[in-house]
Image (cartoon, rainbow, N blue to C red):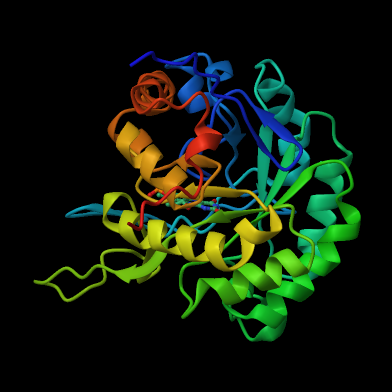
């Protein structure tokens, strides 16, 4: 078989990515951690830790617990806050030739709007990813992302204030049917979807009876959640995103090149890598290299050729 020249480039909304491999929010801060290991410009995009209006310390430790096939975390959105992000972290990221997607979190609709609008006005922000797995303090603490009406209201409020950057809504998997929240986000104006965020979990010390995390519950990530993530990407793609041409950034347990192929086939245009960075910080560049060979082996000239391609016989 003649192997085609592979062009790894993909587009996520208006973001031109040189390959479909991005970082996942919260697993490599604002890029500095990974920049010690490799040149960030080899990636398709950098997704930052969630940024809130004011700096946050997050929860006291322990806030991470390893599980048999994953990681449970309750970091509590520790971050430097909008002002320090714009003043210090974003300029440092501009040194790299890579699109920056800034993840945004908030406790109220107004907080999301204020942070998103400021980021949209800043130079060097290619995308804004809304982390909707945050409790909405005005609605009794229920997550924005599990209530389709609250989610639609949030995206509708942010949408007119994000004119330049690509608006990505990161869906929570803690719902009965991901198609319902995917539809709410897209109909409210999302340019792209990312999924999935972590699945809620609990770890207990069997001898003391204490929860391992100070926050009691945490979010599960890593290899354990990959099949759930693939199913949800597939469902969101089939029911909502695919027919409307809305791209999906897939994530949840991506570690090996085969995982990337699976996510593309399920319907993702690109993937984010989170927990795998704690095992091997060079996972990103390794996947970029591996993907070229894997696509050539499949006779594909582009990752786009695989998007949504499940062989159902
Ligand atoms: C330590 C840690 C911190 C995280 N922080 C954030 C965050 O600030 N905002 C967010 O949207 N997702 C956050 N996530 C979720 C990841 O971005 C991702 O959705 C999830 O971990 C699944 O991908 P993975 O299995 O590749 O880690 C965090 C995950 C971990 C493990």
Q: Is residue 31 above or below residue 60?
A: above
Measured as percent of width and height from the top left, residue 242 is found at 61, 57
Measured as percent of width and height from the top left, residue 291 is found at 40, 25
Measured as percent of width and height from the top left, residue 176 is found at 46, 80
Q: Residue at x 74, y 24 (%)?
A: 91
Please indicate whether residue 62 sits to the left or right of residue 165 in the image: left
- Quarter of the image for residue 279 reads top left
Q: Nearer the viewer, residue 61 or 13?
A: 13
Say whether residue 10 is visible. Answer: yes
Q: Quadrant of the N terminus?
A: top left
Q: Nearer the viewer, residue 31 or 192?
A: 192
Q: Is residue 190 above or below residue 297?
A: below
- Quarter of the image for residue 254 reads top left
Q: Residue at x 54, y 23 (%)?
A: 8
Please indicate whether residue 307 sits to the left or right of residue 263 in the image: right
Measured as percent of width and height from the top left, residue 30 is found at 58, 33
């Amino acid at each position: 078989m003649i192997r085609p020249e592979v062009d790894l480039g993909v587009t996520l909304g208006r973001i031109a990515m040189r390959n479909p491999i991005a970082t996942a929010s919260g697993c490599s801060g604002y890029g500095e951690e990974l920049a010690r290991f490799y040149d960030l410009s080899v990636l398709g995009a950098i997704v930052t830790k969630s940024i809130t209006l004011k700096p946050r310390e997050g929860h006291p430790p322990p806030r991470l617990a390893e599980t048999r096939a994953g990681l449970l975390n309750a970091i509590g959105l520790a971050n430097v806050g909008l002002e320090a992000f714009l003043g210090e972290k974003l300029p440092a990221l501009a040194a790299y030739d890579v699109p920056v997607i800034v993840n945004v979190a908030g406790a109220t609709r107004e907080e999301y709007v204020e942070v998103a609008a400021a980021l949209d006005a800043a130079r060097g922000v290619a995308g804004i990813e809304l982390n909707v797995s945050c409790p909405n303090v005005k609605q009794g603490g229920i997550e924005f992302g599990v209530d389709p009406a609250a989610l639609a209201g949030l995206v509708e409020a942010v949408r007119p204030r994000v004119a330049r950057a690509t608006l990505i809504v990161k869906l929570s998997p803690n719902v009965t049917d991901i198609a319902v929240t995917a539809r709410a986000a897209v109909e409210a104006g999302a340019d792209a979807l990312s999924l999935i965020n972590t699945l809620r979990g609990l770890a207990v010390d069997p001898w003391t009876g204490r929860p391992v995390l100070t926050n009691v519950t945490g979010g599960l990530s890593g290899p354990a959640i990959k099949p759930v993530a693939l199913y949800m990407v597939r469902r969101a793609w089939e029911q909502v995103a695919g027919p409307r041409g809305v791209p999906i950034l897939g994530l949840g347990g991506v570690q090996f090149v085969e995982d990337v192929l699976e996510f593309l086939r399920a319907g993702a245009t690109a993937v984010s890598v989170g927990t795998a960075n704690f095992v091997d910080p060079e996972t990103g560049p390794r996947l970029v290299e591996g993907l070229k060979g894997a696509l050539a082996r499949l006779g594909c000239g582009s990752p786009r050729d695989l998007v949504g391609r499940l062989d159902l016989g």
